[in-house]
Image: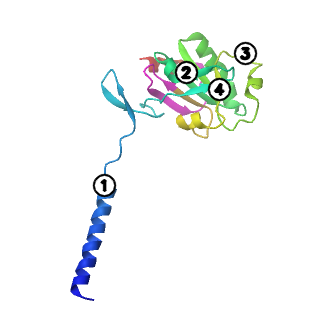
Amino acid sequence: MKKSTYVLLWTLALALLAAVLVFVNLPEKAPPSVVDPTENTPVPLGAAVGETLPDFTITCTDGSAFTLSAQRGKVVVINLWATWCTPCVRELPNFDRLLRERKVAVLAVHAPPVTTDVPAYLAAYGYAIPFAVDEDGSLSALLNASTVLPQTIVVSPEGVVTYNQEGALDYETLVSLVDAAAE
């Protein structure tokens, strides 16, 4: 091979290497965000603690609609549960009591898979909680739901997630989470 061919091949190889290095080191796109009016700083959208939960609307089992943005100014507690989940069923009275005794918005969402007639299941209990069924999993995806149930998400009056964890909660813990989100 001629010397000029080697020079050309090395030049192309170095150019390709430079292009790869530039591409790999490009800054990441910033996640979508909203501006925190109290501090005039951007807050990323998402379901992780410290992020602003994106708005959503879900139809409840009684036919009403629950829209997150309509709850602004109140602490919102979202419980992901299932009829087949024993810890979930045991903690539902805590969420019902929280709704009845505190100025909060509560939403209980039956996570997929849905294996029973949820309204028929709930008919015997007389809960005041709005219940919804996430049949297609879209709300669970928005909430970064895990496959472990129950899962509770607490949202401040400004819409910022202050708690998002799996595991059953007792009433006292729910109250402390709500109080912390209200501050």
What mark, if any, has residue 176 been given in the picture? none
Q: Amino acid at mark 2?
A: Leu
Q: Is residue 84 left or right of residue 77?
A: right
Whether residues under marks 1 and 4 lie with C-beta atoms below 8 angstroms apart, the answer is no
Q: Residue at x 43, y 33 (%)?
A: 45
In this rendered view, identify the residue nearer to me: 79 or 46.
46
Question: Dot 2 corresponds to which residue?
Answer: 174
Q: Amino acid at mark 3?
A: Gly
Q: Cα distance, mark 1 to mark 4?
A: 44 Å
Neighbour tally class for label 1: few under 14, some 14-19, many 20 plus, Cα within 10 Å: few
Q: Which residues are magenta?
A: 154-173
Q: How is the image coloured?
A: rainbow
The mark nearer the N terminus, 3 or 1, is 1
Q: Amino acid at mark 4?
A: Ala
Q: Is residue 86 visible?
A: yes
Q: Is residue 22 left or right of residue 69?
A: left
The mark nearer the N terminus, 2 or 1, is 1
Instruction: Point out the frontmost of discs 2 and 1.
Output: 1
Whether residues under marks 2 and 1 lie with C-beta atoms below 8 angstroms apart, the answer is no
Q: Residue at x 69, y 38 (%)?
A: 113
Q: Residue at x 74, y 24 (%)?
A: 119
Instruction: Point out the frontmost of discs 3 and 4.
Output: 4
Question: Dot 3 corresponds to which residue?
Answer: 126
What mark, if any, has residue 25 been given in the picture? 1
Q: Cα distance, mark 3 to mark 4?
A: 15 Å
Residue 54, image x, y percentages: 47, 30
Instruction: Point out the frontmost of discs 4 and 2.
Output: 4
